[in-house]
Image: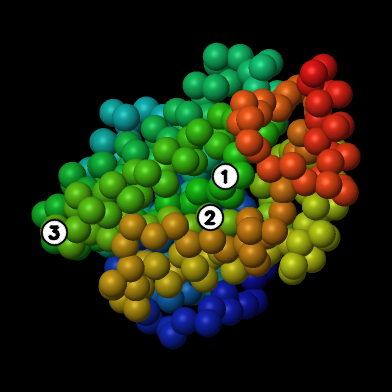
Amino acid sequence: MKNDARFDSVFRPGLFDDQVILVTGGGSGIGRCIAHELASLGATTILAARREEPLQYVVDEIREAGGRAEYLLLNIRDQEAVDAAVAQLVETQGRLDGLVNCAGGQFPSHAGELKPKGWSAVIDTNLNGTWWVSQAAYQHAFREQGHGSIVNIVADVWVGAPGLVHMGAARAGVMNITITLAAEWASEGVRVNAVAPGPILSSGLATYPQEIQQMTLDKVRTTPPSRLGTESEVSAAVTFLLSPAAAYVSGEVMKVDGATSVYKGHMVPVGNHDGTPSWDGFHLGAKLGGLYAKAAKDEQEQSGE
């Protein structure tokens, strides 16, 4: 494996010298990109995930580019394993300055057909896992050090998440964890923020069925940027939030989506329907002519009035 170039970061070299930053989900996708950027800026980057092969691959990439990286095998759903792993990390490294909760996963499913096992798997990973790692970092490092920074990777769930109800519930929960911890741990020097990527050109896209991938591309073309975002654009936001420049930023959910979240509808179309009959009990309600009169008549017919 040959890697001739370092990460081309917009931030100054040495920004994170002597710091240790844990990146869950660092073996692939956005997490891999974040790990590379942080290491290129001087951090000792600790990658955590369940599978050893991709972790070792990314660690080798970072080292070949001149960075410092280690990895640990970790199932973030297992609270006891998380606690022990973070405690060992802090003992070995002597500190932990930052945490990026990037591990997660989901699969498309109609909400009415979602099995309990599938629901629990996504909640346990995306919500509970984020919490277990954050709590362990606080208990074993941040509280005693009097400083620390957490960045949680969430998602665009502002208009719901049809086809991904489990993911939407978990990510919304993480957003609230972000806000809550930002307030509760502030007096101990801990900042907590989140980054919500829009549609990003990442290996994570390839895990979805071809139909979902095509719908995503088609929808993106109708939004202002008319393109997918890059992993580097997400990583830059994470890097900023971990940096001293964000010293006065906490409890923030930063969107990295090219304004797609304020422009688009759902990625998975839900379709129109006539299952919402109107109700108007106001005897002096507005009586408008023209197009409005026709619309009112159509509504009455649909309602069977």
- Can residue 229 be seen from the camera position used here? yes
**Residues packed near mark 3 inside 10 Å, few (<14), some (14 to 19) or many (20 plus):** few
Of all residues, the one furthest to the bottom in this rendering is: 12
- Name the residue type under label 1: Val
Q: Nearer the viewer, residue 184 or 20?
A: 184
Answer whether labels 3 and 2 touch (C-beta < 8 Å).
no
Element type where label 1 sits in the image: loop
Query: Picture coordinates of residue 173 (x, y %)?
Result: 42, 38
Local SS, label 3: helix
Residue at 33% from the left image edge and 51% from the top image edge: 179
Residue occupied by mark 3 = 187
Q: Earlier in the sequence, mark 2 or mark 1?
A: 1
Residue 152 placement, left or right of 256: left
Q: Quarter of the image containing the C terminus?
A: top right
Residue drawn at the location 44% of the way across and 69% of the way down: 239
Q: Amino acid at mark 2?
A: Ala
Tell me the SS state at disc 2.
strand
Number of numbered discs? 3
Question: Residue 247, position in %: x, y?
Answer: 28, 73
Q: Quadrant of residue 286?
A: top right
Q: Mark 2 and mark 1 in contact? Answer it, CB < 8 Å.
A: yes
Residue name at image x 19 percent, y 58 percent: 186
Q: Is residue 64 left or right of residue 78?
A: right
The residue to which callout 2 is attached is: 196
| Residue 95 can be seen, yes or no | no
Give the distance between the C-alpha atoms of the residues marked 3 and 2, in whole angstroms.
25 Å
Amino acid type at image mark 3: Ser
Q: Which mark is residue 157?
A: 1
Q: CB under 8 Å between callouts 3 and 1?
A: no
